Image (tube, helix red, strand yellow):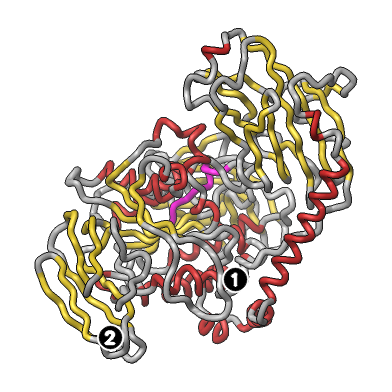
Amino acid sequence: MITLPAFFDDGMILAKNSHVWGWASPGAKISAEFLGEKFETRSDADGKFSFLFNSANFGGPFELKIENKIISDVYIGRVWFCGGQSNMESPVSRSRIELGEFIGDDERIRAFLVEKEMNFIEPQKDVKGKWNVVSGEFLNHMYAVPYFFARKLLAELPDDGVKIGLVCAPAGGTAIESWLPEEIVREKYPHYIPDLEVVQQPGFVERQTEDAESAKNAWILQLNEKDAGLKEKWFEKNFDDSDWETRPLLDNSNFPAHGSVWFRKKIMLPVSAGDTNINDSDILNFGRVEDSVTVYINGVEVAHIPYQYPPCTGMLPKNLLVSGENTIAVRVVGECLSPLIVPGKDYFLQISGERIPLADNDWKYREGAEMAACPPGVWFYSRPCGVYNYLLAPLLGLSVEGAIWYQGESNTYAPERYEVMFDEFVKFFRKNFGAGGRGDKNLPFIFTQLANFIDPQGDGENWAELREQQRRCLKIPQTAMAVAIDCGEYNDLHPYDKKTVGERLALHALRMVYNKKVISDGPNVSKISYENGRENGKIKIFFENARGLWTKNGRPQLEIFDKNGGVRMVFAEIKGNALVASCENKPVKVRYGFSDCPATTLYNAAFLPASPFVIEEI
């Protein structure tokens, strides 16, 4: 009797040189048949066995037989590991409203989405998940960045029928220390040991999680009881709201510190009921709300978002809308934060392709129940080693062509540690992933620099500092960085534009792995010089990959620091492939784009942006 990891199963994509393993009785003789060849091995003292399968060509479908287990619909293709935190985990469905024309079934892509969880005690042997063709209903659940990454590869590589396999193991809210094994944390980062040992106490995580959930459920129950007699009728279409206050939808003033607020609005549709909702594309887009929101149309719930990060969207049931008057009711609940309808997002109904704006001044408003703050929840995904043990450890030995990575938001609390820990993570990853299951010190590792974002609860320049730490990680051989400084939204931690990110990651893969002659980098700062003229000195900043240098949304602005601790903001001019700016004294440090959400972006002719940067050796 043998067992195999979940990712060695029907529909899988294997690399040309693949390492496949499983478990049996210790010392058992194990046979396999694949690609017309027969193989034999024995399991070790722990019962683990493995095979190396080599194929000169891509293709399929094939059948793999290991003892009495038959795995069907197997393809030899291009396999990539995809990891990180929530922006790598964000599903295609969240990008459909703005990017729907670029999203469609693609049977050339298959994905294994690792079910996320954590374990702080010991590394696990297996994961949960299954291979899926990226089509049909699964497409909505597919992670957007890997999806657009694969689509770009397929668009640029020869149309030879080769399939792409994506092993996706991201987990939202994970810091880089979450992905490190315990032996590395204990040896090199002992300041994390107290955090680790707390969550390793038997039952600690379970008790804390249960207590937090119980406290929140009790809070919600109390809120609903206070809203009793209100909630049950305020969402109804024909409820009389004539005595409610009239105010703009985005007027968040004078909300209760915590609790619920309600909005209602009547809209007139000059169409017959038979003509509405005839398309599955008819949707509600209600921007983003903190902390949670429920939206009703004509008394029917069409969207419920239980926490602050996901966009509030919903498909409209057919025949819900009617000709003439329709009513939208919105309940916003502030739990740990105050209720907030986030400004700057899009709020609309889309009916038969036409958008009806909702963020106007003609809304009825009434306060619901006021509450004390909801007891805070607990979050353990950012603790050391837990995600490594559950998500990554079972995958060690997997044969991949490279890795794409989007992570770092959860390390902005202490960004100065990131460069060293990321370097350690990449080294460990490369020891355990590569062709034939052998470690590969040159395995391409392509990571995403954090997008632009203003954290309303942040503390200054932590996002900017984390980006600089990521930029310095380019010193690690065979790495590349997809700059996303123009892909974010100032008011959203999870921007919708995952297409640009995925495609920029793919450009690096095309160059590094598939030897395509593509421009994959934006302008990279290379050096700086200082010239002291008769009146004022000038600094000149040189770039690589800077042909056609230009800026979007204004002139490039530099922060110039002098030896006395002074700092000046100076506009620079573009001179060829360089920036030139006046400077009274020789600077000791120069920064560009060093804010959470820079106002301008510097590009080359390929429309690829420069990373924000800090130069201190002048």
Q: Quadrant of residue 442?
A: bottom left
* Residue at the image position 53 percent from the left and 56 percent from the top: 530
Q: Which residue matches tag 2? A: 43
Q: Does 547 sit left or right of 201 as displayed?
A: left
Q: What residue type is labelled 1?
A: Arg
Q: In which quarter of the image is the C terminus?
A: bottom right
Q: What element carries label 2?
A: loop
Q: Residues within 10 Å of mark 2 (few under 14, many from 20)?
A: some
User: Which of the pair 83/10 is nearer the observer?
Assistant: 10
The location of residue 519, given as percent across then percent down, is 33, 47
The question of residue 483 being in magenta is answered with yes
CA–CA distance between discs 2 and 1? 41 Å
Numbered range of the magenta stretch: 481-488
Identify the mark nearer the N-term, 2 or 1: 2
Q: In this picture, is 480 found above or below 325?
A: below
Q: In which quarter of the image is residue 276?
A: top right
Q: Which residue matches tag 1? A: 417
The location of residue 615, given as percent across then percent down, is 55, 60
Q: What residue type is labelled 2?
A: Ser
Q: In this picture, is 108 found above or below 302?
A: below
The question of residue 13 being in magenta is answered with no
The location of residue 71, given as percent across then percent down, is 25, 63
